[in-house]
Image (cartoon, rainbow, N blue to C red):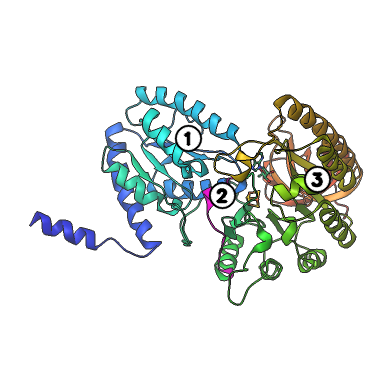
Amino acid sequence: MEKNREIRETENIPVTEPERQYYFIEKAAAHLREMSREAGRPLTFCVTTFGCQMNARDSEKLVGILEKIGYVEEENEEKADFVIYNTCTVRENANLRVYGRLGQLGRIKKKNPHMMIALCGCMMQEPEVVEKLKKSYRFVDLIFGTHNIYKFAELLATRMESDRTVIDIWKDTDRIVEDLPSERKYPFKSGVNIMFGCNNFCSYCIVPYVRGRERSRDPKAIIREIERLSADGVSEVMLLGQNVNSYGKTFNPPVTFAQLLKEIEKVEGIRRIRFMTSHPKDLSDELIEVMARSKKICRHLHLPVQSGSTRILEKMNRRYTKEGYLDLVERIRKAMPDISLTTDIIVGFPGETEADFEDTMDVVRKVRYDSAFTFIYSKRTGTPAAVMEDQVPEEVVKKRFQRLLDEVQTIAAEACAVHEGTVQEALVESVNEHDDSLVTGRLGNNLLVHFPGDESMIGSYVNVRLNECRGFYYIGERTEKEK
Ligand code: 5AD
Ligand code: SF4
């Protein structure tokens, strides 16, 4: 009798997604109600995100599921009953930070019997990491990876029903599950995944190994999501992918990223469209044309150069040359003279000579980036660059890094000052953290401006005169004048 019921229960579990996850959300919710009753209070969660915008978007999905289950958000992770680390592994520092904080969390868990800890994200896709966690961090309750994040509710319900660590890591996937809950950090803007994974295998980069092969989302699903976001008050979307320029190539017939943008532009209520990241090798003239003609696509391109030396670019497997990159920048600037360009640069890639580094400095001086993220090369086990000879000595790298940083910052401040005195439209994002008589708005070119205002302005578009440039942001004032 008992056995029969068990079988019937198993049969009732939906096999299709997302229905299956909604079933487990209900199940986890029932367990949580029980746990809350025992504790005599609502139970709380805290999601901490490491790394990029992709991870930030994934975290919003985790929060959406947790809130549906009935957990209440707690900002201080030391007080939360359920702590989730959404990890990054792009550089080694990111991993070290996770281990450091996890050790501290373990000590807190000893004092709080209700506490649970989950780890997910890119770091979990590395087998050595999971081995280390199993051996030295046994207090972790739940471990999952980047490919099965949509199964969070199911894994959590499983953990709630057993007292053993639940570990579920997939090597890769070709599946994309739509229509799961998600909770936005900002009511007026949102990230939208348009593709997952990366096929480029830049020789220093671990992303293709931990995020898997490139998969584009169905354009109809993307438009549907953006329409829903717009109906819910979102006016700015950030399209997310490791290499948005190769969007839709695997469809039959193929859909280009530029075509997708044109469709998104038609969505009523969307006033700003951003996207990242663009790989220079795939940035098409069609895209430049669509951007130049658009009133909604922001005049900002994040175009990682990584190195200015053709020799190093080849070793990095970037598949463009210094000249090719500079030519692309020229074409972009010709079509959109007011565009803001930002980049990523790696210093100290194996074999980088002084002459190679000078090439990087040369590109920085020629392009004059509005801002640049600069990184010291970090060896990632399993990538081709990790076993390359001629790793550059640390002291040499540090000196080059400082020189690059100085140059980048000087140029960025000069580029920012060019707009001083102009009137620009800003989307008000928040009340200023340090001075609550000010609000912080974002300009189309992605720079921030602080100006007098109050909370009621959040989410609205206002014209602001940029009175003073302070390096990489402005102090301004609201004006009725059109730009
Ligand atoms: N070392 C240093 N920086 C790296 N990046 C990716 N992999 C590495 C690495 N192994 C940088 C690249 C990329 C950005 C997201 O991180 O510049 O564009
Ligand atoms: Fe890494 Fe290159 Fe893919 Fe970017 S394009 S995620 S740097 S492999």
Going from N to C along the chain, the mark reached first, 1 or 2, is 2
Graded by Cα atoms within 10 Å as few (under 14), some (14 to 19) or many (20 or more), the crowding at tag 2 reads: many
Query: Circle 2 is placed at which residue position?
Result: 57
Work out whether residue 108 or residue 324 is closer to the camera in this orientation and state it: 324
Amino acid at pointer 2 = Arg
Query: How far, Cα to Cα, is label 1 from label 2?
Result: 19 Å
Quarter location, residue 225: bottom right
Is the distance from the Cβ of mark 2 to the nearest ligand 1 atom less than 8 Å? no
Amino acid at pointer 3 = Ser
Number of the front mark, 3 or 1: 3
Amino acid at pointer 1 = Glu
Q: Secondary structure at mark 1?
A: loop
Q: Which residues are drawn in magenta?
A: 206-219
Instruction: Report x, y in % for residue 60.
Output: 52, 48
Query: How far, Cα to Cα, is label 3 from label 1?
Result: 47 Å
Task: For the residues labelled 1 and 2, say whether their Cβ atoms are less than 8 Å apart.
Answer: no
Query: Circle 1 is placed at which residue position?
Result: 74
Graded by Cα atoms within 10 Å as few (under 14), some (14 to 19) or many (20 or more), the crowding at tag 3 reads: many
Instruction: Report x, y in % for residue 370.
Output: 82, 44
Query: How far, Cα to Cα, is label 2 from label 3?
Result: 33 Å
Quadrant where the N terminus is found in the figure: bottom left
Is the distance from the Cβ of mark 1 to the nearest ligand 1 atom less than 8 Å? no
Instruction: Report x, y in % for residue 482.
Output: 87, 55
Going from N to C along the chain, the mark reached first, 2 or 3, is 2
104 falls in the magenta region: no
Give the farthest residue toward the front.
389
Work out whether residue 34 or residue 151 is closer to the camera in this orientation and state it: 151
Q: Secondary structure at mark 3?
A: loop
Q: Is residue 451 visible?
A: yes
Work out whether residue 67 or residue 155 is closer to the camera in this orientation and state it: 155
